[in-house]
Image (cartoon, helix red, strand yellow):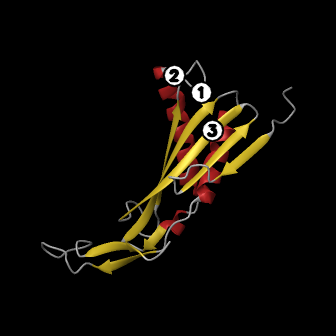
């Protein structure tokens, strides 16, 4: 019925190759999110990293997701989740390695495995759970003694991993 809640199951760490992942079942709806990280210079604010979200709705998810519909609904869900990130829902300052020099960018890929309704809620839960599961390594920016070419901002710097 419309007033009954669906059972919710959240499994974290389900994708071994990801830096963070989660699978969410909301009733018969099932969504998986995997997160990978990149490092590089900040692109917007000097003290914040980025989170980029992508939602894929494939025909395996439900028969109605053919090319056009999948791209429209997937784009709508992607925009919603990206707006959620931009609203401050996730603290991007924790992705800063060194202010103005280096930060993490998280790439969150969400795939719908089965759609039986509440897809927005399932994707939101999967993204939140996968982000919570992310374990970033300790990184530092060091002087690159082997840098060739003219010195300049960031040319003589290298981002290195300090540990796991």
Task: Assign a secondary structure to mark 1.
Answer: loop
Q: Is 99 left, or right, of 62 in this rendering?
A: left
Name the spot of residue 164 as percent of width and height, x first. 50, 71
Name the spot of residue 65 as percent of width and height, x first. 54, 22
The mark that comes first in sequence, 1 or 3, is 3
| Residues at discs 1 and 3 in contact (Cβ within 8 Å) | no
| 106 over 6 or under it: above or below | below
Give the image quarter of residue 73: top right
Distance from the alpha carbon under mark 1 to that under mark 2: 12 Å
| Residue drawn at x 56%, y 49% as measured from the top left | 15
Task: Assign a secondary structure to mark 2.
Answer: helix
Q: Which residue is mark 1?
A: 61
Q: Disc 2 vs disc 3: which is toward the camera?
A: 3
Does residue 118 appear anywhere in the picture?
A: no
> Disc count in the image?
3
| Residue drawn at x 58%, y 58% as measured from the top left | 88
Q: Which mark is residue 31?
A: 3
Q: Which mark is residue 14?
A: none
Q: Which mark is residue 69?
A: 2
The mark that comes first in sequence, 2 or 3, is 3
Name the spot of residue 75 as percent of width and height, x first. 49, 34
Task: Assign a secondary structure to mark 3.
Answer: strand
The mark that comes first in sequence, 1 or 2, is 1
**Residue placed most toward the observer, 161 or 105:** 161
Badge 3: how crowded within 10 Å, few (<14), some, or many (20+)?
many
């Amino acid at each position: 019925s419309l007033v009954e809640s669906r059972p919710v199951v959240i499994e974290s760490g389900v994708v071994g190759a990801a830096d963070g992942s989660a699978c969410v079942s909301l009733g018969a709806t099932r969504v998986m999110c995997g997160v990978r990280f990149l490092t590089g210079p900040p692109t917007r604010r000097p003290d914040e990293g980025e989170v980029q979200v992508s939602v894929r709705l494939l025909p395996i998810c439900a028969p109605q997701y053919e090319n056009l519909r999948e791209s429209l609904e997937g784009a709508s869900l992607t925009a919603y989740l990206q707006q959620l990130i931009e609203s401050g829902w996730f603290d991007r300052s924790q992705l800063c390695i060194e202010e103005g020099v280096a930060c993490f960018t998280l790439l969150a890929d969400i795939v719908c495995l089965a759609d039986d309704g509440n897809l927005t809620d399932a994707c939101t839960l999967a993204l939140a759970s996968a982000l919570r599961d992310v374990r970033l390594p300790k990184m530092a920016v060091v002087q690159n003694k082997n840098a060739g070419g003219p010195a300049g901002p960031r040319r003589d710097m290298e981002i290195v991993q300090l540990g796991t």
